[in-house]
Image (spheres, rainbow, N blue to C red):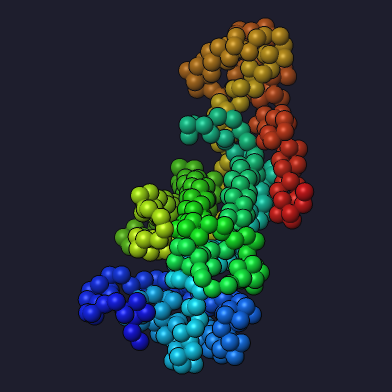
């Protein structure tokens, strides 16, 4: 099959150029989307009388046969046909003969490839949203099982105040909820139809773009043909959202790695999500969360790469834009793989409730509650803060925790202390006292859990 654009040329393309400029080794992933777009396009051409109805029918039959072969894995793609569009057109020519050449009437590879990517990202974004929800469900299940599990809350990776483990987990639920909302909102921009823009200026044929949009279930059409073929905002947005999503996955992975270490021992990962050492037989390495953390950099790189490709391009299409696909495909694969592993890893991890409770019982994370206690007795907070700092220093010097300090010792710092201070300092009381909306108190966490359930069930 001669190159479609070969009429103006007197020499064959250098084989190295063919290899360098060919995109078939990665854009073959768009095969089904390319056929989907072509089926809608040729149906529109036939309905508009731009090509004879019998030719449209023959092309549709041929495309459906090729689609079946692709699904069954009976197709081989060739570098000499450059890209997915030319490969499929070659297959169609082999299937039905010269009438296959009418398929490209009224369109360009420029609007064709843009349409393929819109279709691909629409499908993948919808699938990734479902995967995010599976991780959210795993988080909710673990949170529900740990509504009474106390653990240290941290700032600066220093113990700050006791919290419920359920509360900590649910923080990631809401991060993922925002990621999901961003993905859902991005579908508004993904669902714009570029087909019909031609190479850059539209077409002389009396096409019906509205009909093509209807057949492909697009909500809008690009109103500007230059923008239609040169826009890659929807891919940038997807990778940007993916970068934020991977940031959240990476932060959770980091905590899982810390919690599963011998230093913390707050959780234990299931053996099926860990590996061993080639030299140290005692090791149980959290390889999965480590890789989740590491793969975040791939997605960041894909975003910076595409931003760099696009930043200096004049309108409309340029060959540089062929570089838009590999980062998009890699981001999709990274998100799918990461989310698919994260949900069962969270579901199967064992929570060491005793270790967590011991941690909040042997630290000074209840110090703020003494200050609050003194405030209720009439002491200004700043004075209370300074006073508690001195009590903590006293306890450290005498190798005590705050529950070990005697009432007489407390009274030596302030006569406002009474026997009720020991109830205030109990870790469970410290947690439950934080009953403000969104707080870590059990009542608030149960409200938060119900809200999470409602969001997963799409209730308003």
Q: Is residue 431 visible?
A: yes
* Residue name at image x 67 percent, y 18 percent: 372
Residue 128 is left or right of residue 140, and the answer is left
Compared with residue 400, is residue 361 higher up or lower down, i.e. above or below?
below
Looking at the image, which residue is at 33% across and 84% down?
2
Residue placed most toward the observer, 377 or 7 = 7
Q: At 71% from the left edge and 25% from the top edge, which residue is drawn? A: 423
Taking depth in this image into account, of 274 and 81 the one nearest to the observer is 81
**Can you give x and y, in whole percent of width and height, for residue 427 in the image?**
65, 31
Q: Is residue 150 above or below residue 34?
A: above
Note whether 129 is above or below 12 in the view shown.
Answer: above
Judge from the rendering whether residue 55 lies leftward or rightward of residue 307; answer left or right: right
Q: Quadrant of residue 279?
A: bottom left
Q: Is residue 60 left or right of residue 28?
A: right
Question: On the image, which quarter does residue 419 sit in?
Answer: top right
Whether residue 418 is visible here, answered yes or no, is no
Measured as percent of width and height from the top left, residue 56 is found at 58, 85
Quadrant showing the N terminus: bottom left
Q: Is residue 425 left or right of residue 71?
A: right
Q: Residue at x 71, y 9 (%)?
A: 378
């Amino acid at each position: 099959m001669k190159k479609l654009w070969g009429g103006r040329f007197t020499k064959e393309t250098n084989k190295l150029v063919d290899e360098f400029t060919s995109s078939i080794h990665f854009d073959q992933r768009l095969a089904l989307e390319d056929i989907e777009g072509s089926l809608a396009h040729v149906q529109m051409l036939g309905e508009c009388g731009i090509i004879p109805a019998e030719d449209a029918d023959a092309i549709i039959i041929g495309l459906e046969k090729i689609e079946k072969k692709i699904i069954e894995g009976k197709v081989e793609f060739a570098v000499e046909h450059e890209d997915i569009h030319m490969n499929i057109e070659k297959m169609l020519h082999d299937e039905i003969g010269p009438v296959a050449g009418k398929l490209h009437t009224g369109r360009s590879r420029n609007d064709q490839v843009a349409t393929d990517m819109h279709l691909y990202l629409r499908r993948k974004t919808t699938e990734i949203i479902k995967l995010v929800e599976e991780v959210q469900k795993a988080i909710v299940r673990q949170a529900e099982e740990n509504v009474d599990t106390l653990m240290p809350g941290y700032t600066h990776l220093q113990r700050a105040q006791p919290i419920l483990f359920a509360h900590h987990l649910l923080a990631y639920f809401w991060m993922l909820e925002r990621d999901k909302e961003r993905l859902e909102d991005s579908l508004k921009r993904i669902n714009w139809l570029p087909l019909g823009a031609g190479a850059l200026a539209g077409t002389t044929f009396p096409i019906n773009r509205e009909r093509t949009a209807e057949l492909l279930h697009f909500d809008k059409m690009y109103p500007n043909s230059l923008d239609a073929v040169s826009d890659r905002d929807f891919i940038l947005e997807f990778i940007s959202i993916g970068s934020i999503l991977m940031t959240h996955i990476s932060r959770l992975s980091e905590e899982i790695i810390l919690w599963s270490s011998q230093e913390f021992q707050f959780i234990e990962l299931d053996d099926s999500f860990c590996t061993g050492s080639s030299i140290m037989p005692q090791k149980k390495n959290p390889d999965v969360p480590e890789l989740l953390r590491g793969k975040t950099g791939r997605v960041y790189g894909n975003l910076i790469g595409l931003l760099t490709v696009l930043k200096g391009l004049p309108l409309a299409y340029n060959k540089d834009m062929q570089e838009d696909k590999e980062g998009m495909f890699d981001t999709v694969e990274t998100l799918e793989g990461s989310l698919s592993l994260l949900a069962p890893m969270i579901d199967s991890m064992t929570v060491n409730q005793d270790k967590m409770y011991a941690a909040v019982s042997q630290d000074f994370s209840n110090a703020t509650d003494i200050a609050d206690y003194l405030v209720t007795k009439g002491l200004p907070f700043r004075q209370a803060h300074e006073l508690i700092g001195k009590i903590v220093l006293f306890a450290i010097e005498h190798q005590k925790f705050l529950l070990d300090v005697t009432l007489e010792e407390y009274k030596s710092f302030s006569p406002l202390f009474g026997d009720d201070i020991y109830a205030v300092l109990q870790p469970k009381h410290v947690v439950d006292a934080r009953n403000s909306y969104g707080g870590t108190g059990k009542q608030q966490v149960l409200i938060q859990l119900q809200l999470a359930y409602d969001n997963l069930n799409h209730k308003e």
